[in-house]
Amino acid sequence: MPMMVGYYISNLVLVSVLAVAAAAAEHHTVHFVNQCGLGTPILQQNGQTLSTGADYTSNGSLSNAVAFLQIGGCGPIGQGCITVEMTLENPTSTADIALIPPYALSTSYLSFATADAAAALQSFAFMTPIAFEFTGARRTGSGASCTVPECSGPGIEGSNPNDLPIVCDGKNVGITITFCE
């Protein structure tokens, strides 16, 4: 009987250790909100598409990822469109809205029959209002938004070399990216 008690205690300790390890495992979720009425939210990392609009949860860090709204005028990694660049990792995550090449407005990715259609989509691609907000950390609510082509400020990566990303300290930080806020 004493061996059985020891066996059960050992199993209980093992289950407890595994539960703590699972709870402590690093993970990050990217959530999209598309209020534009068209387009497909895209999340990519190193040229690989991770999501086409559904929530994406990484098991571990998510480094150098790019999110954008594909409306037909964006290049394969978001070129020509406004993007959110992010690195989500414990204990510090960063994100910014990129307005610099290759994510600056470019007509080379547009191939439409009429110049008017290309110009209209080009304008929409760049002017699609975009915002991001960190979630699940002490600084939930920190983020940035861009609603006009000349937007600037914290978290907006433009032509100013002093532009800095928004930083969020915390474990398992997530991000919500909203189009047409």
Image (cartoon, grey):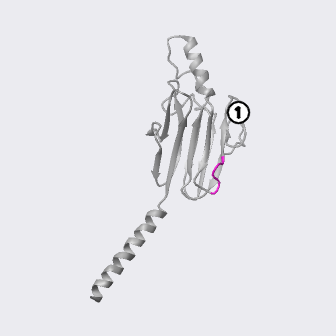
Relative depth, front residue between 150 and 131: 131
Q: Quadrant of residue 179?
A: top right
Q: Position of residue 81 (x, y in %)?
A: 57, 29
Q: Tell me if residue 37 is in the magenta stretch.
A: no
Q: Nearer the viewer, residue 103 or 95?
A: 95
Horizontal side of 157 relative to 16 (left or right) equals: right
User: Residue at the location (69% across, 29% down)?
Assistant: 148
* The magenta segment: 138-142
x and y percentages locating residue 147 in the rendered image: 67, 32
**Which residue is nearer to you in this view: 86 or 1?**
1
Does the magenta run of residues contain 139? Answer: yes
* Residue 135 in the image: above or below residue 67: below
Examine the rendered structure and indicate whether residue 60 appears above or below residue 5.
above
Q: Residue furthest bottom?
A: 2
**What residue is at 66 percent from the left and 38 percent from the top?**
145
Give the quadrant of the C terminus. Answer: top right
Rendered residue at 41%/72% (across/down): 16
Q: Secondary structure at mark 1?
A: loop
Decide whether the magenta segment is chiefly helix, strand or loop. loop
Provide the residue designation for mark 1.
151
Q: Residue 166: percent from the left, percent from the top? A: 66, 47
Name the amino acid type tagged 1: Cys
Question: Which quadrant would the N terminus be assigned to in this image?
Answer: bottom left
Q: Residues within 10 Å of mark 1 (few under 14, many from 20)?
A: few
Where is residue 6 shown, x and y percent of the image?
A: 32, 84
> How many numbered badges does the structure rendering display?
1
